[in-house]
């Protein structure tokens, strides 16, 4: 599995030790250790879900402190369930860290060669993490079913390739999200995958005309077919809907729930 649970003060999070050893801070937060109250209890890190913004900012402060990173060294994108991925530059430092208005608009993927921390938000959608050792570049992508069906993972890999990155050397980590155990979708969703993929082994038909959708496997197939080596992909295989004590889940909890953060940063560029 290669992902591990970590505890730091009041915070619990998931990381990949192999990436940490390479100098890449990679994290996925849990709902534990925050200041929030029901239904955002307790570590909601999303400013866009109706929670008290002062509480969210306190929660973010705890998250950034845990990584030793100031607000000015963090960048957030808007997230619109699209497929746009953008390069983040030094001048973007601080965008979206404290308020929604300054986030980079209409992007679901951020990539950078700077040492800025990239943060995205999740409550069932799939966090995809990228590292290109030859570029010392990292990225994070928000892949819900739409982004997955439209292969946003491939879009991110192509960004790195455009900058001279070699995808056969790329590392990809697939974080916690709603799993194939819990994610029931209808024919409309299934059709998007059937029209965009040659094979759809990640769709399991149910007797009532619905399907169980494995977003982990679909995203793994996308990055494999773009040229990532299977041994360089780390899948957490942890279901957000199945673990209410650890994670918010949009499918399980409804609209009024919190968000976990996906976090990635090159710890040292030296
Ligand atoms: Zn599940």
Image (cartoon, helix red, strand yellow):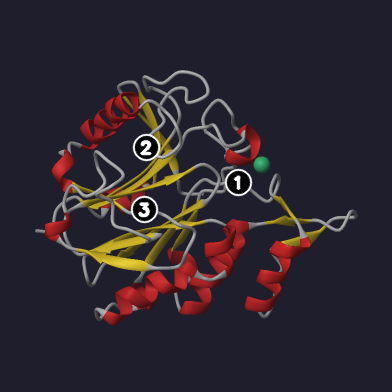
Compared with residue 195, is residue 256 higher up or lower down, i.e. above or below? above
Q: Is residue 270 left or right of residue 117?
A: left
Looking at the image, the residue that sits furthest to the left is 270
Q: What residue is disc 2 on?
A: 47
| Sequence-wise first label, 1 or 2 | 2
Q: Which mark is residue 78?
A: 3
Q: Is residue 118 visible?
A: yes
Q: Residue at x 29, y 33 (%)?
A: 60
Residue 24 seen anywhere in this rendered image of the structure: no
Q: Can you identify the residue that label 1 sits on?
A: 178
Give the left or right position of residue 62, taking residue 231 as reference: left
Residue at the image position 39 percent from the left and 35 percent from the top: 13
**Circle 2 crowding by C-alpha within 10 Å: few under 14, some 14–19, many from 20:** many
What residue is shown at x 21% (from left), y 31% (from top)? Answer: 65
SS type, badge 3: loop
Of the pair 195 and 117, the residue shown nearer to us: 195
> Distance of mark 3 from mark 2, alpha carbons?
11 Å
From mark 1 to mark 2, how far is it between C-alphas? 21 Å
Q: Mark 3, residues whose alpha carbon is within 10 Å: few (<14), some, or many (≥20)?
A: some
Residue 200's x, y, as percent? 70, 71
Looking at marks 1 and 3 on the same chain, the residue that comes earlier in the sequence is marked by 3
Q: Earlier in the sequence, mark 3 or mark 2?
A: 2
Residue 174 to residue 46: above or below: below
Residue 66 screen position, x and y as percent: 25, 32
C-alpha distance separating marks 1 and 3: 21 Å
Question: What is the secondary structure assignment of the residue under circle 2?
Answer: loop
């Amino acid at each position: 599995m290669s992902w591990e649970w970590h505890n730091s003060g009041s915070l619990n999070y998931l990381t990949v030790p192999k990436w940490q050893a390479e100098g890449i801070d990679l994290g996925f937060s849990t709902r534990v250790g925050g200041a929030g109250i029901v239904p955002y209890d307790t570590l909601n890190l999303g400013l866009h879900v109706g929670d008290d913004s002062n509480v969210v900012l306190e929660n973010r402060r705890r998250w950034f402190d845990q990584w030793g990173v100031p607000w000015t060294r963090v960048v957030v994108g808007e997230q619109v369930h699209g497929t746009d991925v953008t390069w983040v530059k030094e001048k973007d430092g601080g965008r979206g860290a404290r308020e929604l208005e300054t986030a980079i608009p209409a992007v679901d993927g951020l990539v950078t060669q700077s040492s800025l921390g990239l943060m995205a938000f999740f409550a069932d959608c799939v966090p995809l993490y990228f590292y290109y050792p030859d570029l010392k570049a990292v990225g994070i992508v928000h892949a819900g079913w739409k982004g997955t069906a439209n292969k946003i993972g491939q879009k991110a890999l192509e960004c790195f390739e455009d900058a001279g990155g070699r995808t056969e050397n790329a590392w990809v980590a697939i974080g916690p999200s709603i799993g194939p155990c819990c994610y029931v979708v209808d024919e409309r969703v299934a059709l998007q995958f059937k029209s965009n993929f040659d094979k759809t082994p990640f769709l399991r038909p149910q007797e009532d005309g619905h399907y169980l959708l494995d977003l982990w496997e679909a995203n793994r197939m996308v990055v494999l077919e773009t040229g990532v080596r299977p041994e360089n992909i780390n899948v957490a295989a942890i279901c957000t809907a199945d673990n209410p004590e650890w994670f918010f889940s949009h499918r399980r909890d409804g609209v009024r729930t919190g968000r976990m953060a996906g976090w990635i940063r090159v710890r040292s560029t030296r």
